[in-house]
Structure formats: C-alpha cells, structure tokens
Amino acid sequence: MYFTSSGEYRQSKVYLVCGAPASGKSTYVAQHKKDGDLIVDLDLLRQALGAPHKTSQLFTELLLSIRETIYKEIIAEHINCENIWVISGLADSDERQRTAHRLNAEIIFINTPYEECLRRAEKDSTRKDKVTQKYIINKYFDKLT
C-alpha cells in the first residue's frame, strides 16, 4: 500500500518479471520503474551484500531467506511504494504462476531467444565467468515450460 500525491491510499502494483539469464529482465525494469519503486532481485541482493557471483550454498540460502522475508512483506502489504518489481528466472510455468498468485503479481515474461541470451551474456563485461553463464542459460532453457 502507498499514499498517492493527492493523499489517497492505494495498493501497490506487483510485477513478476521473468525470463532467461541475459534476456533483458533488469533492462526492462530499469526502463519502466519509477522513482521510489522497489526492485527485488537476487543479483542485486548479492551485490548489496558484497558477495561474488559464485557463492557458497550457505550464502545462497541466506540470500533466499532475505528474499523470502521481502516476499512476506509484499504479501502483508507492508511496503510503501507504487510499484514492486520482482525479477526472477522461473523457467517452470507452474512455479511462475504459483509465485505470481502468491505475490498477487502481474507476470511480465521476457521471451528472448536462446541464441540472443548467449550472445548478450558473452558480450556483457559484468558476466566474468562465460562458461558458467552458458551453463546457467542452457539449464534455464532445458527447464523452460
């Protein structure tokens, strides 16, 4: 929930932005978000905590726990902003639907072709380990339903 500029109390709009690694999810959100919107993204959480891209299982569990806490706050409508952008891969359509239902979110599926995701990942200087990037893109498309 949030207050509009005219003082009205409104429910936040939640968007679940899904797609393959290097599909353009973060770019889409950056182009559509407004000042004050909340962005929930494991990659951003990892960066905020100063962790490298490759992390231990324990650290990954910590990141997932933090994200789950944020999800609970979204569900309870405790977040005071107009839009909430949740960025996640969610290759499995059933899991995508369950997550959207749970968060009362509109799904925005970034349907970038496999070859384009590989090309973008290879070109992206922030993605240091190109072998791992190719692996996770392949893994995503193997699970895509």
Image (spheres, rainbow, N blue to C red):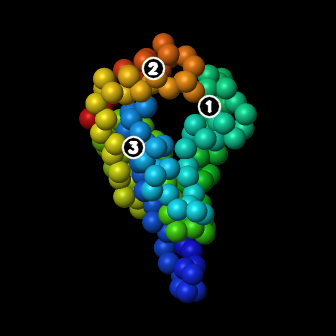
Q: Nearer the viewer, residue 121 or 8?
A: 121
Q: Residues within 10 Å of mark 3 (few under 14, many from 20)?
A: many
Q: Residues within 10 Å of mark 1 (few under 14, many from 20)?
A: some
Residue at mark 3 to residue at mark 2: CA–CA distance: 20 Å
Write the residue at 62% across / 22% down. Answer: 54
Q: Which marked residue is nearer to the observer: mark 3 or mark 2?
A: 2
User: Which residue does the numbered mark 2 point to in the structure image?
Assistant: 122
User: Which residue does the numbered mark 3 point to in the structure image?
Assistant: 18
Residue at mark 3 to residue at mark 1: CA–CA distance: 19 Å
Residue 135, position as x, y percentages in the image: 43, 17
Q: Is residue 27 left or right of residue 92?
A: right
N-term-proximal mark, 3 vs 2: 3
Q: Quadrant of the N terminus?
A: bottom right
- The answer to whether residue 49 of the structure is visible from this angle is yes
Secondary structure found at label 2: helix
Q: Quadrant of the C terminus?
A: top left
Q: Which marked residue is nearer to the observer: mark 3 or mark 1?
A: 3
User: Which residue does the numbered mark 1 point to in the structure image?
Assistant: 60
Q: Is residue 60 left or right of residue 105?
A: right
Answer above or below: position of 35 versus 100.
below
